[in-house]
Image (cartoon, rainbow, N blue to C red):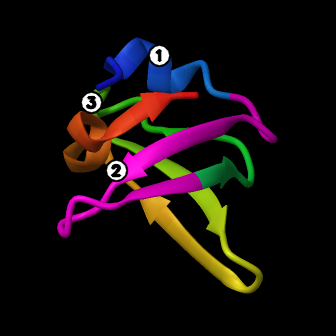
Amino acid sequence: MITLDQAKSLGSGSHVKYINYQGRTINLKINGKVRTWKKDANRIEIPVKFGLYEYGILNILDLPNISLS
């Protein structure tokens, strides 16, 4: 589990581990800049890449399932 401040400090190219709903661990690569909003400090979007062609976006609800690797 990572905190909101740790998530905001992730840089492009960083690697994290994500535990999906089946309990499997997936290695993710941060694929861009973490997006934040001025009006809502708790809103973030983290672009990620996993696998060969798969991309996704993580948000605040996914933080309990993310760990730094």
Which residues, given as a range, are shown in magenta? 11-27
Query: Residue 55's image quarter?
Result: bottom right
| Depicted 34 relative to depicted 10: above or below | below
User: Residue at position x 52%, y 71% from top?
Assistant: 56
Q: Is tag 1's residue or tag 2's residue first in the polypeptide sequence?
A: 1
- Using residue 52 as the reference point, say whether residue 43 is left or right of it: left
> Where is residue 69 shown, x and y percent of the image?
58, 28
Dot 3: within a 10 Å radius of its alpha carbon, few (fewer than 14), some, or many (20 or more) residues?
few
| Residue 50: in magenta span | no
Helix, strand or loop for disc 3: loop
User: Residue at position x 73%, y 35% from top?
Assistant: 14
Q: Provide the residue designation for mark 3.
A: 42
Query: Alpha-carbon distance for marks 1 and 3?
Result: 13 Å
Helix, strand or loop for disc 1: helix
Helix, strand or loop for disc 2: loop
Q: Provide the residue designation for mark 1.
A: 6
Query: Alpha-carbon distance for marks 1 and 2?
Result: 13 Å
User: Residue at position x 22%, y 35% from top?
Assistant: 64
> Where is residue 9 shown, x and y percent of the image?
60, 18
| Depicted 57 relative to depicted 51: above or below | above
Dot 1: within a 10 Å radius of its alpha carbon, few (fewer than 14), some, or many (20 or more) residues?
few
Q: Is tag 2's residue or tag 3's residue first in the polypeptide sequence?
A: 3
| Residue 15: in magenta span | yes
**Who is closer to the viewer here, 45 or 68?**
68
Q: Amino acid at mark 2?
A: Asn
> Where is residue 19 shown, x and y percent of the image?
31, 52
Q: Provide the residue designation for mark 2.
A: 59
Between circles 1 and 3, the one closer to the viewer is 1
Mark 2 in CB contact with mark 3 (< 8 angstroms): no
